[in-house]
Image (cartoon, rainbow, N blue to C red):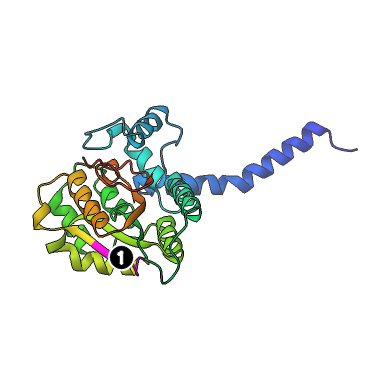
Amino acid sequence: MARSVPARRSRLTKALVVVLLPWLLLLQNCAAEAAPWFWPAPMEDPYCLSWRVMVEANNAKGWRTVPPPCVAYVQAYMAPWWGQYHRDVGSVADQAAAYAAQLVVAPPGGDGLDAWVFDVDDTCLSNQPYYQANQFGAYDPVAFRMWASRGICPGIPAVQWLFQTLKGRGFRIFLVTGRDEETLATSTTANLAAAGFSGYDRLIMRGALYRGQSSVAFKSAVRKQLAAEGYRLRGNVGDQWSDLQGDCVGDRVFKVPNPMYFVP
């Protein structure tokens, strides 16, 4: 006699339990032993999502640390390979490349004065490992200098692609960073080269003349000098609004997301 439908379903259920139970136990053990960042908080957390939007829109200003309830959220957002951050940066790079494709650049042998400005920290090079290890706490200039001096910051792939795309289109590239020139010039130059950022026209760092100045004041002065040299600043890419404000910001600015810290 053929088995009834309920009997067949019962056998199927038992079989699935036998097959899946070891995997479920394994996942449970991994979750118990894994580092806190391995299992991220749900990305749909409404409070933290709204907070991140306020950061990117420059409505949240002067904050020193990621709000404690949002540390796991930011870890998940910034996670290498699968975090939403990398898709967002890719979208920024796509928009910048599409804009650049519409511009008429002086041909080879022309004046060669069409230029783009890039920030370095968390625009070209990622400091995510450093900030995550410190639970996105308050900025410590001594600890950060030690991290940056190691020259191991990973490159941000989408920005590296944009960098190379703009070079291929004939734009001049200037990297402008608030890193201290006296202590970090060598490590930063080597780190950029290792991360695929080579062939730029100039790396401009914060020297003694600009110590103590705000990021807006320092970067404005640099851009004004480039403009005085005759360069047409067609685009400007940075992770902080202070990279993109002030004088001679360029024809268009492109903000790379960064919910890890705020630079006034």
Q: Quadrant of residue 47?
A: top left
15 or 134, nearer to the observer: 134
143 or 219, nearer to the observer: 219
| Quarter of the picture holding the N terminus | top right
Q: Tell me if residue 151 can be seen.
A: no
Name the residue carrying label 1: 192
Structural crowding at the residue carrying mark 1, measured as other residues with C-alpha within 10 Å and reported as few (<14), some (14–19) or many (≥20): many
Question: What range is drawn magenta here?
Answer: 197-203
Give amino acid for label 1: Leu
Q: In this view, does 64 lie above or below 235?
A: above
Residue at (37% x, 66% y) in the render: 111
Residue at (24% x, 64% y) in the render: 188
Q: Position of residue 92 (x, y in %)?
A: 44, 47
| Callout count | 1
Q: Is residue 145 above or below residue 191?
A: above
Prevailing secondary structure class for the magenta stretch in the rendered image: loop
Residue at (37% x, 47% y) in the render: 251
Q: Tell me if residue 49 can be seen.
A: yes
Q: Position of residue 149 (x, y in %)?
A: 19, 63
113 or 159, nearer to the observer: 113
Q: Where is residue 36 in the image (x, y as percent from the top left)?
A: 35, 44
Horizontal side of residue 151 vs 24, given as left or right = left
Label 1 sits on a secondary structure element that is helix
**Magenta segment includes 198:** yes
Q: Where is residue 257 in the image (x, y as percent from the top left)?
A: 37, 44
Horizontal side of residue 188 vs 34, given as left or right = left
Residue furthest to the bottom in view is 109
**Magenta segment includes 165:** no
